[in-house]
Amino acid sequence: MKPVTEIAPGIHYVGANDRTKHRFEGLWPLPNGVSYNAYLIDDHKVALVDTIDASFTERLVAGIREVIGDRPVDYLIINHMEPDHSASLAAVCRLWPGITIVGNAKTLQMVEGFYGVGGSADNHGAVSTAVKTLTVNDGDTLSLGARTLQFHLIPMVHWPETMVTHIAAEGIVFSGDAFGTFGALNGGIVDNQLDTTVFFEGEMVRYYSNIVGKYGVPVQKALQKLAPLLPLSMVCPTHGPVWTAEFPRVLDLYDRMSRYEPLERGVVIAYGSMYGNTEQSAEALARELAARGITNIAMHNLSSSHASFVLRDIFRYGALVIGSPTYNMHLYPEVQALVDDIELRCISSRVFGCFGGFTWAGAAVKRLSEFAGRVGWEMVAPPLEVRQGFSAGKASGGLSAIAEAIAARLG
Ligand code: FEO
């Protein structure tokens, strides 16, 4: 029986699953783990495409040895330098000292900066640390014998040095972070070995919105660059499933997310609440929306929902309503953090409404209105400000106006 790790003839998955790390980049929760994907191309020359997190170097090496035994790895292709993919680089170079590191000029500068490996790189030149490097430019090729690799630079997806590696004859692309997902690979590696529709699709949207979401314009440029390579038989990202038949759906998702287009009809209600008054406005608004036929309503109390899930839903749905108490004459801190996250990601448009609490002074609604102005989002209805305690009498007129306007906009 062919091992699951041989994802195509001569192309082997040599990545690892991490089910112990709590937060990716120290920030983003991993309730279902994450996979660090690396790939080995077993040709006349052997090429390793990316490495993996330093905690799993031994598993990477074991996976490589299982495929090639005592043969050496000839090339290390570096598509992306973030340490979740490059941190085993120095160990790989020590184990196979004849290896050539292949990357673009920015990559090789980072190789030296992060790991002290390289030096002043020149094409095929030995360098100060005795590790050979090969600098590639956009469109350059490298023959492994039977296969030829071609490199395409896709800067800012997700770092400036990022590139993809293409095997034209087989329609295979090694895509770096592009098309990756959170979530460990529990057995299957390729999309036809997994149920990807609910879990991995949600984790792709969360990965994209959290990690790559700021770079919509570079992602669009990357998609334009990849268009002439289509159709592809296999796309191999650095996290999550390898895409084959499902790639067109994934590509469409990426196109829409990078245009900041909503993926589904729905509303996010994200709010802070100290004593439950603002939360009661949020609950009442959700009921008003449901009464108007909106079935996808994501409620996030920002004191308990991690921002990564809120951002995922903001990328997913077309409308966002934010509620906040006034706190220190400003927004509630968790709400401030969310609006900062949104601004940082340059989300170009959402149907927007807001409500807030006035305890002894009112600032929240004013700050949320200013936020809408800064990001260029139109407020669909006047903001609702509830004085002191919540009551249906105080809130229902304002909330139903917000709900009515949102329902009309979403259609
Ligand atoms: Fe998975 Fe940008 O690193």
Image (cartoon, grey):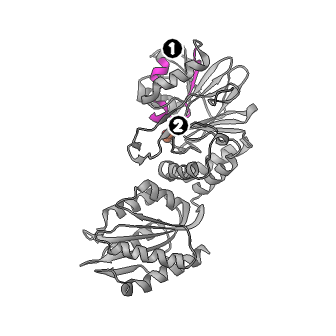
* Quarter occupied by the C terminus: bottom right
Q: Residues within 10 Å of mark 2 (few under 14, many from 20)?
A: many
Res 367 seen here? no
Magenta includes 221? Answer: no
Labels 1, 2: front one: 1
Q: Which residue is mark 1?
A: 97
Q: Is residue 208 above or below residue 242?
A: below
Location of residue 291 in the rendering, given as x and y in whole percent from the top left corner: 53, 79
Report helix, strand or loop for mark 2: loop
Location of residue 52 in the rendering, given as x and y in whole percent from the top left corner: 49, 31
Label of residue 161 in the image: 2
**Amino acid marked by disc 2:** Glu
Residue found 36% across the figure and 59% down from its top? 304
Location of residue 277 in the rendering, given as x and y in whole percent from the top left corner: 32, 75
Q: Residues within 10 Å of mark 1 (few under 14, many from 20)?
A: some
The magenta region covers 72-93
Residue found 40% across the figure and 62% down from its top? 339
Q: Does mark 2 have its CB less than 8 Å from ligand 1?
A: no
Q: Is residue 267 above or below residue 134?
A: below
